[in-house]
Amino acid sequence: MRIKINGNPYKSMLCDSNPCHPCAIFATFAVTFIFLTNFEHHNRINNFMQKSIRIIFLFLVFNSGFAQTNFENPEVDPNQIQKNFSDWSAYQSKNIMLSRDFVALDVLSKEISKESFLDQLANGNYIPVRLKSEDSGYYYKLFEIQPNSDTSIKATINQIGFDAYKNYKMEGTTFPEFSFKDLNGNPVTNESMKGKIIVIKCWYIHCTPCIREFPQVNKLAASYKDRKDILFISLAEDAPDQLKVFLAKRPLAYAVIPNMKVYMNEALQLNSFPTHFILNKEGLISNVLPNFESLEVALAKESKL
């Protein structure tokens, strides 16, 4: 990912309270047990009934504890991958996709909102680690960054967290108004794209990660060529003449709109490239994504809706 940093990470105060915390569940069972025990005593229920209730109580506690711990173990040692930046970077790039749907857990294994999770990554002293699970779901937990860890780990994850948080807050909002022409002179406007799913790639010629994913996004566009309700367009910073020369050697299977630097900086407030948008048929932003891998997953989901 190519990052253009401008401004400080957004600070916010978010409540992480969750009434379904295991301690709350256990407390509920305990109060119920005490009540039932007293009730039994005062009403002289026979020993068999008392034992039966206690067995049921223990069974519920056991199953509650199991349900809360079936995804507790991290898939890697959180301390081991912090020993140097290259280990952390290799793990993060392959195993953590903050744009996908996942269950978010804080350092105490309490489930929190995705918004709170991303906010803490952006502004706190944590790394995300995926937990092992018995299902196909994704469970990410916050682990504290160790004092002796490479300082680049914190700086990088704060920036990644900030970008992911900002992208998450854009989801569900209306894509900014636009009226452009692509390199072939075809008009591209909000109105002309109503009722369609729109995939937008934001890039520029000298962005190496943007160009590296060309073969992948071209293949993705080709796989949806029979879907008339899905359009692929790209916003490029560069001038038309530069783009025509460049694309003659490296084709892109998207409609390309030139001179989009100001629009992407001001209207979209982008500071990371490439960035991909998926707009639903109502013109709302469904996803804001940092790479091809997350784009492929999100588009597969959106195209089935």
Image (cartoon, rainbow, N blue to C red):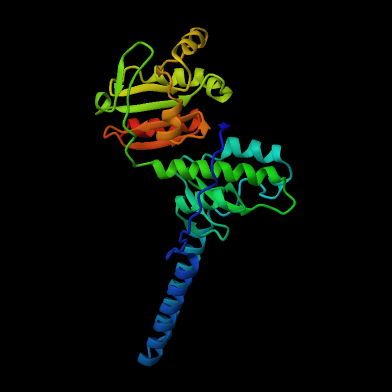
Horizontal and vertical percent position of residue 223: 39, 19
Horizontal and vertical percent position of residue 77: 67, 48
Tell me the quarter of the image containing the N terminus. Answer: top right
Picture residue at 35% right of the left edge, 91% below the top: 43
Horizontal side of 39 relative to 6 (left or right) equals: left
Horizontal and vertical percent position of residue 215: 51, 17
Q: Quadrant of residue 254?
A: top left
Above or below residue 87? Residue 46 is below
Picture residue at 36% right of the left edge, 20% below the top: 224
Horizontal and vertical percent position of residue 226: 31, 17
Picture residue at 43% right of the left edge, 72% below the top: 56
Between 178 and 213, the one lying in front of the other is 178
Tell me the quarter of the image containing the C terminus. Answer: top left
Q: How many marks?
A: 0
Q: Is residue 201 visible?
A: yes
Picture residue at 46% right of the left edge, 70% below the top: 24
